[in-house]
Amino acid sequence: MKPEKYIDFLNIIEKLKCNTRHSWTSSGRQESVAEHSWRLAVMAMLCADEYPNLDIKKVIKMCLIHDFGEAVTGDIPAFLKTKEQEMEEYDAVKRLIAGLPEELRTEFQDLFEEMNARKTPEAKLFKSLDNTEALISHNEADISTWLPREYEENLTYGRENCEWSEWTKTLRQEIMKDSIKKIEQAKRGNHL
C-alpha cells in the first residue's frame, strides 16, 4: 500500500477515536468506538484457550474492524438502530475499504460478510463478545448514565448470541449477576 493511501485510510478511521458510543466509562466520560473495538479484541485474545479449534486471529480482526462504518456514520445504539441505518453503515464500510489494496479489501469484505451471516464459530464468538463487552461497559458505568429502558435491556441483551457456546453462556450469566447487583444497589439507594 502506498504511504499516502495508508495515511488517508488511517485519517478516516481516526474518527473511531472521536465518535462516542452510548456507553460511559467508569471515570464518567463517554467511551469512543475505538475503545470498544480495542477491548473487544483483548477479550477475544484472552479467551483463545477456551476455543483451541477456532481461528482467534480472525476473531481479533473481526473485533478490530467490525465498527469501521461508524467512522463515517457515527454510533447508533443497537436498541435504536434501524435496518436502514444498518445498511447505511454497511455501505459506508464498502466505500471505506474500496480504496484498500485488493488483497486487504477482499479480506475485509469477506470478514464483514462472515460477521453478518453469523454462521461460523468465529463469527458467533465475535458477536457474543461484542454483546458482552457492551454489557460489561454498562456495568462499569455509573447507573445514572443508563436510560430507563436499559434496566431490562441489560438483562436480556445478547442472550441469543451467547447461547451457541457453554463458555459465552456462562460469561453472560456472570455479567448478569453484576447487572442485577448494580440495579438492586441503585434501588436501595433510591437512584432509580
Image: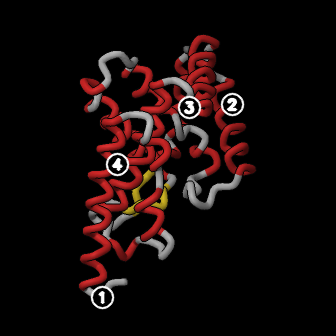
Earlier sequence position, callout 4 versus callout 2: 2
Q: Pick whichever, 100 or 158, lies toward us.
A: 158
Amino acid carrying label 4: it is Arg
Q: Which residue is mark 3?
A: 118
Residues under labels 3 and 1: Cα distance? Answer: 41 Å
Amino acid carrying label 1: it is Asn
Q: Which residue is mark 1?
A: 190
Position of residue 122 relative to residue 161, above or below, is: above
What SS does tag 1 mark?
loop
Report whether residue 8 is seen: no
Using the image, tell me which numbered label, if any, was put on residue 94.
2
What SS does tag 4 mark?
helix
Q: x and y percent of residue 87 in the render?
A: 72, 43
Amino acid carrying label 3: it is Arg
Q: Residues within 10 Å of mark 1 (few under 14, many from 20)?
A: few
Q: x and y percent of residue 153 in the render?
A: 47, 63
